[in-house]
Image (spheres, rainbow, N blue to C red):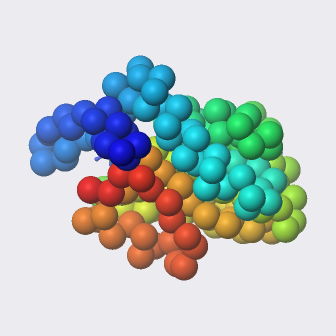
Amino acid sequence: MSTEILQQSIRDIPDFPKPGIVFKDITPFLRDPVAFGVFIDLLADQYRDADLDAIVAIDARGFLFGGALARALNIGLVPVRKKGKLPSACISEEYELEYGTAIVEMHDDALKSRERVLILDDLLATGGTVAATLKLCRKLGAEPVACAFLIELSFLNGREKLGDIPIFAPIVV
Ligand code: AMP
């Protein structure tokens, strides 16, 4: 039932940002406090007893949920950003896009060794961004315990890039 509320709040935009892509638009979901609350509560219930030290949220839509979840669990938030956006010293990871590569960064003092983190983004597509984020966390010695999304595009097999880490996504397409 609660998954239905989430599903109904996601809008498909065909051919955005280019022909052949069906973009999952989460802006109606963000505008709906019931749907937003259902998702944050689902996440909080899922991870309340996971002994997490921080949420690692991915630029940019991961931030929209990251702050709310970090507050609900009373833990901190670490932003992973596209290259060149973070002000202090960073570690970086490059990953493949359909055409070319991209780089994500994290402050080099954002996590301590053995800290347990949840990686959070809006959507799992090819898995490249999250795989790079897992590497950033592990470079600092942290322990990613799970990856969570609002939506998983299962036909893109993104999970294959993530090893055996548990994946949570209430909407699977
Ligand atoms: P990927 O690295 O391929 O898993 O891409 C993940 C990122 O791209 C996520 O942060 C999504 O916000 C965005 N993304 C990829 N495909 C879509 C899509 N069809 N609809 C909405 N966002 C997408």
Compared with residue 153, is residue 122 higher up or lower down, i.e. above or below?
above
Compared with residue 30, is residue 3 higher up or lower down, i.e. above or below?
below
Seen at 72% across and 52% down, the residue is 48
Which residue occupies the foreground of this view, 132 or 1? 1
Seen at 64% across and 33% down, the residue is 68
Instruction: Locate the N terminus and report the quarter of the image it occupies.
Output: top left
Which residue occupies the foreground of this view, 41 or 110? 41
Compared with residue 90, is residue 27 higher up or lower down, i.e. above or below?
above
Instruction: Locate the C terminus and report the quarter of the image it occupies.
Output: bottom left
Q: In the image, residue 77 lies at what x, y percent?
A: 73, 41
Compared with residue 160, is residue 36 higher up or lower down, i.e. above or below?
above
Residue extending furthest bottom? 164
How many numbered dots are placed on residues in this image? 0
Seen at 12% across and 43% down, the residue is 19
Which residue occupies the foreground of this view, 43 or 163? 43
Residue 35 at least partly seen: yes
Residue extending furthest front? 1
Q: In the image, residue 21 lies at what x, y percent?
A: 19, 46
Q: Which quarter of the picture shows residue 64?
A: top right
Q: In the image, residue 20 lies at what x, y percent?
A: 13, 48
Q: Which quarter of the picture shows residue 164?
A: bottom right
Q: In the image, residue 84 lies at what x, y percent?
A: 62, 38
Classify residue 56 as left or right of residue 148. right
Classify residue 67 as left or right of residue 38. right
Residue 56 at least partly seen: no
